[in-house]
Amino acid sequence: MRVQPVKRFVAVLVLVGSAVVASAQGSRAEHLVWSDEFNGAGGVPDSANWKFETGGKGWGNHELETYCAPGSDVAPCKAATPNVVVTDGYLHLVARRDAATGKWTSARMTTKGLQSFQYGRMQYYVDDPAHPYATYTREDLPKGAVWPFDDGRYFFMLNLAMGGDWPGPPAATTPATVEMLVDYVRVYQNEQVSSTSGTAGKR
């Protein structure tokens, strides 16, 4: 089956879905506090950073896919054709439509409970079949608006969904295999935050 690649871009993530971080006040001198470069051996994501959410629950959006963990043979998942693999310096998330049943499988992974952050800047480099993500900071809010992400810690979630109420069902031209590549995921914090607030780490 043909894998459909999509354009590559760099996204600075401050406000996208579940993966958000608050803008920190103080010094602007940033340094890297955590990353996953997806350069490891073994073909699967680092279990110290990622865990998998599985099943075909529609995920609040009436999506079509069943999310599969690596090595799962619970139907419709197939260990022989994994939906997530680390190879060639990339994380590959692959959505597949079974030719016999028409069912979609894919992968959904999160750092929740393993790596979470309150302040800083999250950045990743990704091939995404949807659209470029936006960057939002306090300065983008209307005057007097409250920045909503100062309370609590936030985490990354990476998934490749198919169909749903948004953006709608796959078209007749949608390839049977679609792939999203992630080159890296990184978190930067300024000197003041990382040295005094202890925001980096696990939740």
Image: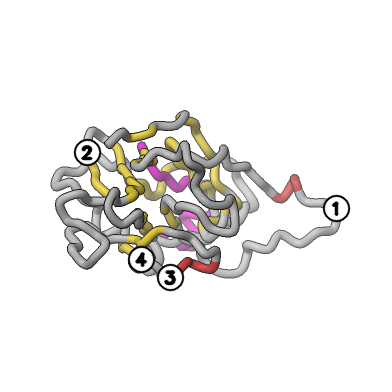
Q: Which residues are magenta?
A: 183-201
Q: Is residue 43 left or right of residue 110?
A: left
Q: Quadrant of the C terminus?
A: bottom left
Q: CA distance from mark 1 to mark 3?
A: 40 Å
* Label 4, residues with CA under 10 Å away: few <14, some 14-19, many ≥20: some
Residue 143: image tag: 1
* Residue 74 - label: none
Place residue 90 in its image quadrant: top left
Question: Which residue: 64% across, 52% down?
Answer: 25
| Element type at mark 2 | strand
Distance from Cα at disc 1 to Cα at disc 2: 46 Å
Single out the mark in the foreground, 3 or 4.
3
Type of the residue with mark 3: Lys
> Which residue is tagged 3?
57
Residue drawn at point x = 47 percent, y = 67 percent: 58
Along the line of sight, the residue nearer the viewer: 153 or 175: 175
Q: Position of residue 199 (x, y in %)?
A: 48, 61
- Residue pushed farthest right? 143
Q: Are marks 1 and 3 in contact (CB under 8 Å)?
A: no
Q: Earlier in the sequence, mark 1 or mark 3?
A: 3
Identify the element where label 1 is drawn.
loop
Dot 3 surroundings within 10 Å: few (below 14), some, or many (20 or more)?
few
Residue at point 36%, 46% (across, down): 35
For the N terminus, give its image quadrant.
Answer: top left
Q: Is residue 49 above or below residue 183?
A: below
Q: Earlier in the sequence, mark 4 or mark 2?
A: 4
